[in-house]
């Protein structure tokens, strides 16, 4: 019997535009924006002075419905919005932009830095809490928070094809570029060699898929070797499936990339793309469908994850359709996150009780094959905390919570309870229920 394979289309069936991206100083060059009122464009320039802005021609031409702007979800996802800044910060920056003579780039930068400092740029102790060491020295391009998983930030992957407005890593993309690290492949390999307890490598960024295949090969090919047998899973966090799907189809090194992935699979690794998809609308292009088929044909899996965001995807029916569509296309729904307490949170956040309602109203509509998704989950200092529900215990209304992942594996799957609070948007806002002083994990966490 002949083996049925997925039908792939030849790359020539797809016309790739030349990749073009626009940043803060090029907002006026984006033709599609010309139809918008002047005040909206001014607002975008003001907000883009504080938050990272970068959008590419594929997103502009294919993923945004311009007749729905400013309410279009992908427009909200990629273009700066007035509500991302509080009134005071906005007015200060707007005043500077209105001034004659025009402010210098340095003046804008100075004020932007002042504003950024107030926006909790490094949440959950990212800068200092999870940094691993090699020969007693901290390693800058890695985080090791959960025993079995190392996060790796390759130095050439520290930007994205387009930036998301709500990004929790926003502070990495503004201001001065960090030092280029030429030894990071060696450091990665040395660290993994010395840490046999690590089973999972999660390559992230920015977006590692902005890198050329030859660079990726430098990091990943070595993991086929026997000394890395303990590394069972290689995950790649990326937005490229929807922000630049040509990476897998027509880019000059697309085939070499797929070959590299196939080689890792053949070497026994579980390879999973952790695809970031915020809205069903992002999945509608033929080239994204083709990219997904090509990745799947290598034997790699694709898991999907995204935060729940006010003004972008606060819509349980959309989430249900998106998970079903993802399952249909061969992807595995994985996480629904809660927007982190950083950056433009004020514009995108939702109260915790609402995140649970949206999750539940979406989850109950899909069959078991899409119920691989977990959430709504907060990536907080002590771990990933799921809002399992809202209920009453002995007349007290409470949140039921549990760790999906934790700094101490012993905390995982132990339910705990917080006083119900309709205004709470993050773990820090919650107080233990039943008159207790502390959550069961709190003393231990504070001592870490
Ligand atoms: C989410 C996350 C992981 C991966 O956790 P899984 O539960 O295995 O998906 C690893 N490290 C950090 C810091 C994370 O936030």
Image: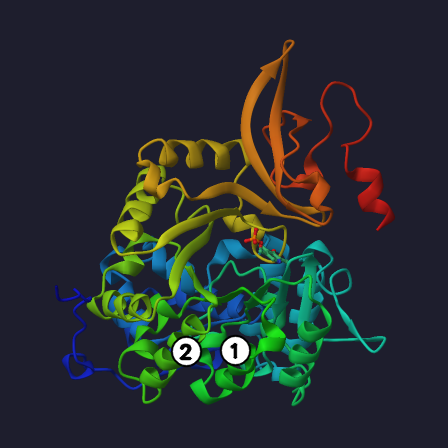
Which residue is located at x 26 percent, y 62 percent?
66
Label 2 CA crowd tier, 10 Å (few <14, some 14–19, many 20+)? some
Label 1 CA crowd tier, 10 Å (few <14, some 14–19, many 20+)? some
> Within the image, what quadrant is residue 368 found in?
top left
Camera-nearest residue between 166 and 158: 158
Mark 1, residue position: 224
Residue 263, numbered circle: 2
- Say whether residue 63 is left or right of residue 151: left
Camera-nearest residue between 341 and 240: 240
Q: Is residue 282 above or below residue 142?
A: above
Image location of residue 256, percent across then percent down: 36, 85
Q: Is residue 100 above or below residue 293?
A: below
Whether pointer 1 and pointer 2 mark residues with C-beta atoms closer than 8 Å, the reply is yes
Which residue is located at x 37 percent, y 52 percent?
332
- Say whether residue 150 is left or right of residue 311: right
Q: Is residue 18 above or below residue 124?
A: below
Q: Is residue 51 visible?
A: no
Which residue is located at x 55 percent, y 73 percent?
97
Q: Is residue 163 above or below residue 212?
A: above
Q: CA distance from mark 1 to mark 2?
A: 8 Å
Q: Count of labels shown?
A: 2
- Kindly state the secondary structure of the residue where label 2 is placed: helix
Residue placed farthest to the front in the image?
1
Image location of residue 17, percent across then percent down: 25, 83
């Amino acid at each position: 019997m002949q083996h049925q394979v997925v039908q792939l289309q030849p790359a020539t069936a797809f016309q790739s535009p030349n990749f073009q991206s626009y940043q803060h100083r090029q907002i006026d060059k984006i033709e599609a924006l010309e139809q918008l009122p002047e005040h909206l464009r001014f607002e975008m320039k003001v907000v883009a002075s504080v938050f990272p802005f970068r959008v590419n021609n594929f997103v502009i031409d294919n993923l945004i419905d311009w007749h729905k702007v400013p309410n279009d979800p992908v427009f909200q996802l990629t273009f700066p919005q007035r509500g991302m800044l509080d009134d005071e910060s906005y007015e200060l920056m707007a005043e500077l932009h209105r001034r004659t003579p025009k402010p210098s780039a340095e003046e804008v930068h100075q004020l932007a830095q002042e504003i950024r400092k107030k926006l909790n740029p490094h949440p959950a102790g990212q800068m200092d809490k999870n940094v691993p060491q090699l020969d007693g020295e901290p390693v800058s391009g890695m985080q090791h928070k959960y025993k079995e998983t190392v996060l790796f930030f390759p130095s050439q992957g520290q930007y994205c094809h387009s930036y998301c407005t709500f990004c929790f890593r926003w502070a990495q993309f503004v201001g001065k570029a960090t030092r280029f690290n030429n030894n990071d492949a060696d450091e990665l390999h040395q660290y993994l060699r010395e840490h046999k307890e690590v089973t999972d490598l999660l390559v992230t960024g920015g977006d590692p898929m902005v890198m050329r295949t030859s660079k990726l090969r430098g990091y990943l090919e070595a993991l086929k070797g026997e000394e890395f047998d303990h590394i069972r899973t290689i995950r790649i966090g990326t937005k490229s499936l929807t922000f630049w799907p040509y990476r897998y189809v027509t880019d000059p090194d697309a085939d070499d990339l797929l070959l590299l992935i196939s080689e890792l699979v053949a070497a026994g690794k579980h390879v999973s793309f952790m695809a970031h998809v915020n809205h069903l609308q992002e999945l509608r292009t033929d080239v994204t469908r083709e990219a997904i088929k090509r990745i799947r044909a290598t034997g790699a899996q694709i898991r999907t994850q995204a935060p729940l965001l006010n003004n972008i995807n606060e819509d349980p029916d959309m989430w249900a359709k998106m998970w079903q569509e993802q399952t249909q296309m061969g992807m595995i729904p994985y996480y629904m996150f809660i927007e982190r307490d950083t950056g433009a949170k004020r514009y995108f956040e939702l109260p915790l009780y609402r995140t649970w309602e949206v999750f539940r109203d979406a989850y109950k509509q899909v069959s078991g094959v899409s119920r691989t998704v977990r959430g709504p989950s907060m990536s907080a200092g002590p771990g990933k905390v799921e809002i399992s529900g809202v209920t009453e215990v002995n007349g007290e209304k409470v949140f039921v919570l549990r760790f999906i992942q934790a700094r101490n594996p012993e905390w995982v799957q132990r339910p705990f309870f917080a006083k119900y609070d309709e205004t709470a948007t993050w773990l820090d806002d919650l107080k233990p229920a039943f008159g207790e002083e502390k959550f069961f994990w709190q003393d231990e966490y504070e001592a870490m």
